[in-house]
Amino acid sequence: MIANDIAYMAMEFEPVGYIRLNEYFNALAVNADADWLMTWNDDAIMDSAGWDRVITAHTGQFKLLALHTHNDHPYSIFPIIPKAWIDVTKHYSPHQMIDAWVSQQAYMLDIFQRIDVWATHDRHDLTGNNTDSTFEARVALEGHLDTPGDFHHMATVNLRIVETENIANYMKSVGIDTTFWENVKLGDQYPWAKLKENDINKQMAQFVMSTPLDTVHPLLAGAAKY
């Protein structure tokens, strides 16, 4: 459709719940025609004027862009990625935790960038607002390492690492430096160094950054020192 000189597509979905949140975004992403794709929630409020111009100023760069939001969480809570990322992976995220998925990949590839745009995540457990049945019934696939499908289950981590390697191969094919990732694989670079540096309010205490990565996937066989 075209309205006010803006082309858009409306998509209708059968409800699949918070546990399969990524499926909505994946379907939208693969059908989008844009330089940048941004996740957004119904409990999010944009605080910065001209935020779109800040994003488009980075067009041509292959990075994950992050807004400032709720105590500057070290992840990109409303991830902004170039469409080329979707072209490589064929989805936004194969896991419910979209922000964590792409943020960890970006840190491992050293392509995470905070931008001067501020937003409020007006979520009930953060602000006390917007409690509803969807929020109360949500199931988060995190915190149960031995449960298949959990964000930190070995099979899930393996998938994330393989996908990170695929993204790195794309980056190399278009002349983007991947030294950071190559050094991670060799064991010469701690992959979460910049994540920890950005975790100014210690919100990632539950993230097991000290787990030896060589026990996870052969691609990271050199990471035993961590």
Image (cartoon, helix red, strand yellow):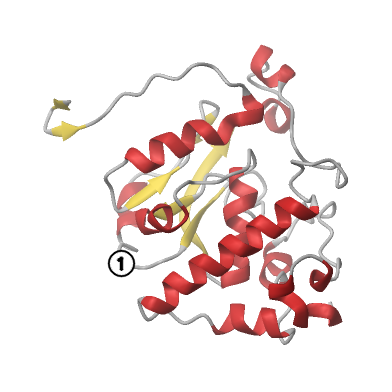
Residue 98 position within the rendered picture, expressed as x and y whole percent measured from the top left: 59, 44
Residue 93 position within the rendered picture, expressed as x and y whole percent measured from the top left: 55, 46
Q: Observer-nearest residue: 186 or 148? A: 148
Q: Is residue 47 left or right of residue 148?
A: left
Q: Observer-nearest residue: 156 or 120? A: 156
Image quadrant in which the N terminus is located = top left
* Residue that extends furthest to the left in the rendered view of this protein: 5
Task: Name which residue lies at 36% across and 53% down.
Answer: 83
Which residue was labeled with disc 1? 60
Task: Name which residue lies at 70% across and 69% down.
Answer: 197
Number of disc labels: 1
Task: Name which residue lies at 57% across and 69% down.
Answer: 165
* Residue that extends furthest to the top in the rendered view of this protein: 133
Residue 23 position within the rendered picture, expressed as x and y whole percent measured from the top left: 52, 33
Report which quarter residue 11 is drawn in: top left
Helix, strand or loop for disc 1? loop
Task: Name which residue lies at 63% across and 69% down.
Answer: 108
Name above or below for residue 76 compared with residue 46. below
Name above or below for residue 44 compared with residue 198. above
Residue 149 position within the rendered picture, expressed as x and y whole percent measured from the top left: 74, 41
Q: Amino acid at mark 1?
A: Gly
